[in-house]
Amino acid sequence: MGRKFFVGGNWKCNGTTEEVNKIVSTLNAGEVPSQDVVEVVVSPPFVFLPLVKTSLRPDFHVAAQNCWVKKGGAFTGEVSAEMLVNLSIPWVIIGHSERRLILKESNEFVADKVAYALAQGLKVIACIGETLEQREAGSTVAVVAEQTKAIAAKISNWTDVVLAYEPVWAIGTGKVATPAQAQEVHCELRKWLQANVSPEVAASTRIIYGGSVTAANCKELAAQPDVDGFLVGGASLKPEFIDIIKSAEVKKNA
């Protein structure tokens, strides 16, 4: 069984009710490959989750952009995994580089969040990736392996995990990892999973790419053997997100 192509849209901290309705209308009208070819998940800010959940086409799913590391309680400003489950939100993004870098979320904290979210029945898009300094120092593979190792130490079942490789230097900068650079890291990650988790997990876990993915570059990236989809930022707020979803056809026809 091949890995089903996965396209996530991370809306980040963007949107008004009017803008969200417009984005959803565009998505609902879009002609995309069927669910057996591509899995599509969009991630609006917390406050718009119910609106998007009720108005979005049924073949697309919704993700939160984060959740708290344990059960809710006296944690002002946080949203717990249990709340997301209560709202029937199936997915959550955890460990995005903006949270790792700006909010100083450590590898261990991210791993604890992943484990807790999975334990509550959520599916997780777990983000990893290196900074420009780390890439220039030649430590890309060591950095992403360390990030993945922290997660692997806390979970035993990878069925509901999608791994998102997002080179920090390519997020929102317009710089994109070349298809060869993306493939190289994805291949190394799969080798790491094979050696440190299991050959089955390595073969079945989807590793998606994020970092300035656009309609212009998605097909070439999608053609790489170890790139199983995308986590799209800015372009997920635009009509071109439909074109990015369509790049799943590249895999189907490969």
Image (cartoon, helix red, strand yellow):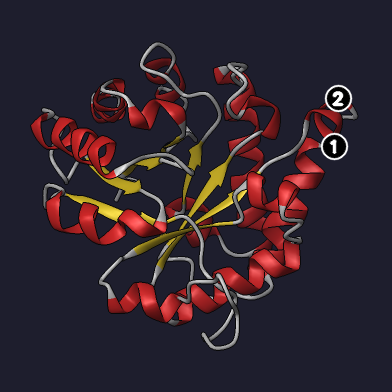
Q: Spot the residue most to the right.
A: 137
Circle 2 residues within 10 Å: few <14, some 14–19, many ≥20: few
- The residue at which mark 1 appears reads as 139
- Which disc, if any, is residue 54? none
Q: Residue 73: horizontal and vertical position, in percent?
A: 54, 88
Secondary structure type for disc 1: loop
Disc 2 residue type (three-letter): Glu
- Residue plotted at (17% across, 45% down): 36
Q: Quadrant of residue 198?
A: bottom right
Are the residues tagged 2 and 1 within 8 Å (C-beta)?
no
For marks 2 and 1, give the CA distance: 8 Å
- Residue plotted at (51% across, 85% down): 72
- Residue plotted at (65% across, 68% down): 111
Q: Residue 66: horizontal and vertical position, in percent?
A: 51, 61
Circle 1 residues within 10 Å: few <14, some 14–19, many ≥20: some
Regarding residue 38, the answer to whether it shows in the image is yes
- For the residue pair 16 and 29, the one nearer the viewer reads as 16
193 sits left or right of 236 in the view: right
- The residue at which mark 2 appears reads as 136
Tally of numbered tags? 2
Q: Is residue 41 above or below residue 233?
A: below
